[in-house]
Amino acid sequence: MPRTCALIACLLVLGACSTTDLATPAASSASARPTATTSDPTPVPGGPSPTEPADEGGEAFVLPAAACPAPAVMPDVPRVRVATRDGAAIIATPGSSTLSTCSTTLASDTVGDDPVVGLGAHRGDRFVVSVPAGWVILAYEGFDRPTVGEGANVTPTLATSTRPSQVEMPIPTRPGRSIVGIHLSIASADGRVVGEISASFQVEVG
C-alpha cells in the first residue's frame, strides 16, 4: 500500500510537470504574437512627404543667378515708375535694394518716413508699375495700409512668364489715402545683373 501511494504521488507530480510544459509554448506563442500597429501613410508619388506639412502657398519664387561675364560697371538701381491706366506716372520713393552680378553684390537698406509723392485713383483702377528700358520684371508683390489707422492688404508674390518691363497691380479697396509698397524681382535684359528692389508711394482713392 505504501508503494501504491508513492506511485500515485509520483504520477501526479509527473502529470503536473507535463501540464506545465504543454502550457508554456501556448503562453510563449501568445506573447510572441505581434500587436496591432497603425501603419505609416504611404507617400503619394510627387506629393509631400508624410513627415512634412503640405505647402499651402506653392513654391516660393527664387531669383536666378546672374549670367557671366559681369558688366564692367555695376548699373544704378533702376527707378520704379507708377501710374494709373489713364494718369501721369510718378517715380516711387526708393526703398531697400540688392543688385548682384556673378562676381559682385551691392545692397542698400533704406528705412525712412512715409513717402510724400503720390497719385490719385478711382475705385476699380489698377496701377501700372514699370522699370526703365534695359530691365525686366521677374516677379512682384505689394502691400497697402492706411496713412492713419490700422489694417493692411497684401498682394502675394506673382512670377511673370514673359519678362515684361511693366506689370499691373490692384489699387487699395479702401477709400481715402493709403501707403502702397512694391517689391520687384528684376534682371537686366541680358541677364548679367539680377536684384530685388522696393519702392513706396501714397495714393488717394476717391
Image (tube, helix red, strand yellow):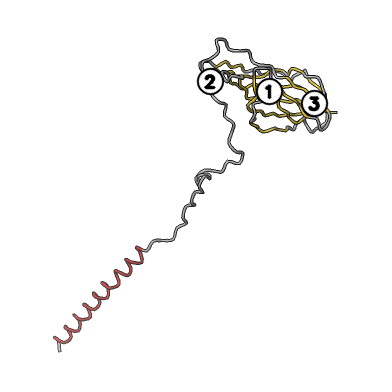
Three-letter amino acid code of the residue under disc 2: Ala
Residue 121 on image: x %, y %: 82, 26
Secondary-structure class at tag 2: loop
Residue 147 on image: x %, y %: 78, 25
User: How crowded is the residue under tag 3: few (<14 C-alpha within 10 Å), some, or many (20+)?
Assistant: few
Residue topped by disc 1: 165
Residue topped by disc 3: 85
Three-letter amino acid code of the residue under disc 3: Arg
Residue topped by disc 2: 67
Please tell me which of labels 3 and 1 falls first in the chain: 3
Question: Quarter of the image holding residue 125?
Answer: top right
- Is 98 placed above or below 143 here? above
Three-letter amino acid code of the residue under disc 1: Ser
Mark 3–mark 1 distance (CA, rounded to whole Å) = 15 Å
Residue 170 on image: x %, y %: 75, 31
Residue 40 on image: x %, y %: 47, 52
Mark 2–mark 1 distance (CA, rounded to whole Å) = 19 Å
Closer to us: 150 or 125: 125
- The quadrant in which the N terminus is found is bottom left
Residue at 55%, 13% in the rendered image: 71
Please tell me which of labels 3 and 2 falls first in the chain: 2
Residue at 51%, 49% in the rendered image: 44
Horizontal arrangement in the rendering, residue 102 relative to residue 206 (left or right): left
Secondary-structure class at tag 3: loop
Secondary-structure class at tag 1: loop
Horizontal arrangement in the rendering, residue 122 relative to residue 93 (left or right): right
Horizontal arrangement in the rendering, residue 4 relative to residue 165 (left or right): left
Closer to us: 115 or 1: 115
Q: Are marks 2 and 1 in contact (CB under 8 Å)?
A: no
Mark 3–mark 2 distance (CA, rounded to whole Å) = 34 Å
